[in-house]
């Protein structure tokens, strides 16, 4: 397999998307990598499991946490065939994944599936008005104007009154989102797929 490590792992996610499509699911796949090793890979399993939450990224996050019995995936990169949706962007934020690489952006997906444009993953994982700088143990409140207010020690984060160190992995790392890598390969997997209502397809397969 040629290309950069990011390309190699993203191709694994694209292969999972292809397998999902062959199973009759929507063609989405995800891979989670820690220290250069794949710790989980999955395709969409919504129809198979009767679970509308079983997106590829969510299935992979669960698998990556279950074997080592951990609730944090800090240091992990999630590779996704398509830009993570609103739910999965929330899931990867709460799991503490600090890097995301995807092929097809939501804007392209919505064009293909005739859906409405959704918020971007980058906007969702970096949402809110806070960044926590773990190196200086200071909390930096980022104001809408771009100006910032720095506070020492215990976090002065809206909605949270504990110390920063009690809440590792949540917002502690700047998220890196790499977009539209291997875009042509990602689009090829979506080409010709009919994005029907999941409820209709799930009901149809029970008959
Ligand atoms: Zn999702």
Image: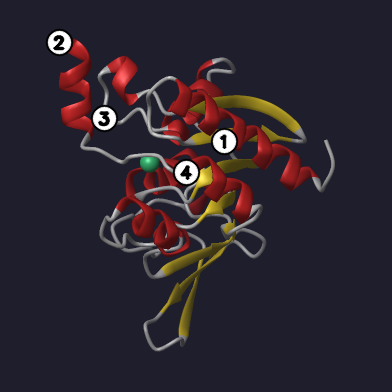
Q: Are marks 2 and 3 in contact (CB under 8 Å)?
A: no
What is the distance, in whole Å, between disc 3 and disc 4 at their CAs? 19 Å
Q: Is residue 104 left or right of residue 120?
A: right
- CA distance for labels 1 and 3: 23 Å
- Is residue 136 shown to the viewer in this render? yes
**What residue did someone put label 4 on?**
190
Examine the rendered structure and indicate whether residue 18 appears above or below residue 151.
above
Alpha carbon separation for disc pair 2 and 3: 19 Å
Residue nearest the observer in this picture, 84 or 206 = 206
Q: Earlier in the sequence, mark 1 or mark 2?
A: 1
Question: Residue at left 60%, top 55%?
Answer: 183
Q: Earlier in the sequence, mark 4 or mark 1?
A: 1
Residue at mark 1: 73
Mark 3 Cα-neighbour bin, 10 Å: few <14, some 14–19, many ≥20: few
Mark 1–mark 2 CB contact (< 8 Å): no
Which quadrant holds the N terminus? Answer: top right
Question: Could you tell me which secondary element the residue under label 3 belongs to?
Answer: loop
Foreground: disc 4 or disc 1: 4
Residue placed under numbered mark 2 in the picture: 207
Q: Residue at x 58, y 55 (%)?
A: 173
Closest to the camera, between mark 3 and mark 4, is: 4
Q: Earlier in the sequence, mark 2 or mark 3?
A: 3
| Residue 86 at x, y percent in the picture | 34, 50
As measured in the structure, the alpha-carbon distance from the residue carrying label 4 to the one carrying label 1 is 28 Å
The residue that disc 3 covers is 52
Give the SS element for disc 1. loop
Helix, strand or loop under label 4: helix
């Amino acid at each position: 397999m040629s290309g950069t490590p990011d390309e190699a792992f993203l191709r694994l996610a694209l292969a999972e998307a292809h397998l999902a499509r062959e199973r009759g699911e929507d063609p989405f796949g995800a891979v989670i990598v820690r220290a250069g090793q794949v710790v989980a890979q999955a395709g969409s399993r919504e129809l198979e499991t009767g679970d509308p939450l079983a997106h590829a990224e969510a299935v992979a996050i669960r698998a990556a946490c279950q074997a080592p019995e951990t609730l944090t995936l800090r240091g992990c990169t999630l590779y996704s065939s398509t830009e993570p949706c609103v739910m999965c962007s929330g899931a990867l934020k709460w799991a503490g994944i600090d890097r995301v690489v995807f092929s097809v952006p939501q804007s392209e997906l919505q064009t293909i599936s005739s859906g409405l444009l959704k918020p971007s993953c980058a906007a969702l994982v970096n949402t809110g008005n806070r960044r926590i700088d773990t190196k200086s143990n200071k909390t930096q409140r980022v104001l809408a104007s771009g100006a910032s207010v720095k506070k020492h020690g215990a976090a002065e984060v809206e909605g949270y009154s504990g110390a920063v160190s009690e809440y590792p992995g949540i917002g502690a790392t700047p998220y890196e989102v790499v977009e539209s890598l291997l875009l042509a390969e990602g689009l090829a997997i979506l080409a010709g797929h009919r994005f029907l209502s999941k409820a209709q397809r799930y009901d149809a397969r029970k008959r």
